[in-house]
Image (spheres, helix red, strand yellow):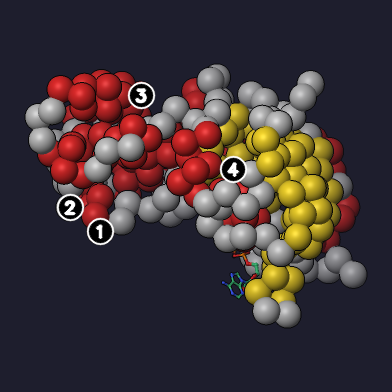
Amino acid sequence: MTAILEVRGLTVKFGDFVAVRDVSFDLAPGSIHSIIGPNGAGKTTLFNALTGRVMPTAGSVTFAGRDITRLPMHRRTVLGIGRSFQVTSLFAAMTVRQSLALACQRKLGLGLLGILSRDRSLAPAAARADELLAFLGLGDVAERKSGELSHGQQRRLEIGLALAARPQVVFLDEPTAGMGIDDIDAVRRLIREIARTCTVVLIEHNMAIVMGISDTITVMFQGEVLVEGPPDAIRADRRVQMAYLGEVA
Ligand SMILES: Nc1ncnc2c1ncn2[C@@H]1O[C@H](COP(=O)(O)OP(=O)(O)OP(=O)(O)O)[C@@H](O)[C@H]1O
């Protein structure tokens, strides 16, 4: 199977500090691939380098056969890479429907003014926003301000913003952080649904979720890939257990 994303020798330095060192992995199309590791292992920095938020110091990222190593984030979005991001103050002041429509709009290359106007060319973004409201289970709160949603609803909206442009690969950064058990279950189901049409890369601290839904898990430790494999192999791997205990040499 040809990988949809190929990461080779990726290194990110902040000054002299190496946050991500020589990371390589393949992302199988249609899979749920989790990146785990103890605090400070380099997961978020790796995500940032893969989505164009930070530029790597060395290495390459190839998406669907195209070298995207140095592309900025917005160009990657257009190519089909989505990323969840926090409901910012801009989104917080807008309704849920408007927030989703704006995110859809970005893909179409139009701005906030377009969304708030009644231009007919906005119909595709509005239709996509409706589709996402239903998919996320946020139809009932569509006209509420995003900033007024419950924590769990806000996290679902963040996932929706990442899906707005119909990505081929979506990066979700701790989608269940701070959630109660009911919301966690809803997000687990949502991720499974997303994976029916899209490859999912996940940073997640909740091991029950990671072990329950991942096809492949890459374990990072001190900026490097410690081990990669299916959940059962990762669960049984002594090095992983030691890493979480902070005892890997
Ligand atoms: N902009 C930056 N400048 C300097 N150091 C940074 C920067 N961003 C991250 N780091 C450092 O890089 C290391 C990896 O951080 P990163 O946030 O990628 O880890 P993580 O695995 O996502 O951790 P956590 O699970 O705690 O979120 C940490 O030591 C962090 O302090």
- Farthest residue to the left: give it: 118
For label 1, the residue is 89
Q: CA distance from mark 3 to mark 1?
A: 24 Å
Q: CA distance from mark 3 to mark 2?
A: 22 Å
Q: Are marks 2 and 1 in contact (CB under 8 Å)?
A: yes
Which residue is at a point 67% across and 79% down the rendered structure image?
Answer: 15
Q: CA distance from mark 2 to mark 4?
A: 28 Å
- Identify residue for label 3: 135
* Amino acid at pointer 1: Ser
Mark 2, secondary structure of its residue: loop
Residue 96 image offset from top left, x and y in percent: 22, 39
Amino acid at pointer 4: Leu
Which quarter of the picture shows residue 200? top right
Residue bearing mark 4: 202
Quickly name the residue at label 2.
93
Nearer the observer, 19 or 10:
10
Q: Which dot, 2 or 4, sits closer to the camera? A: 2
- Disc 3 and disc 4: Cα gap in Å? 19 Å
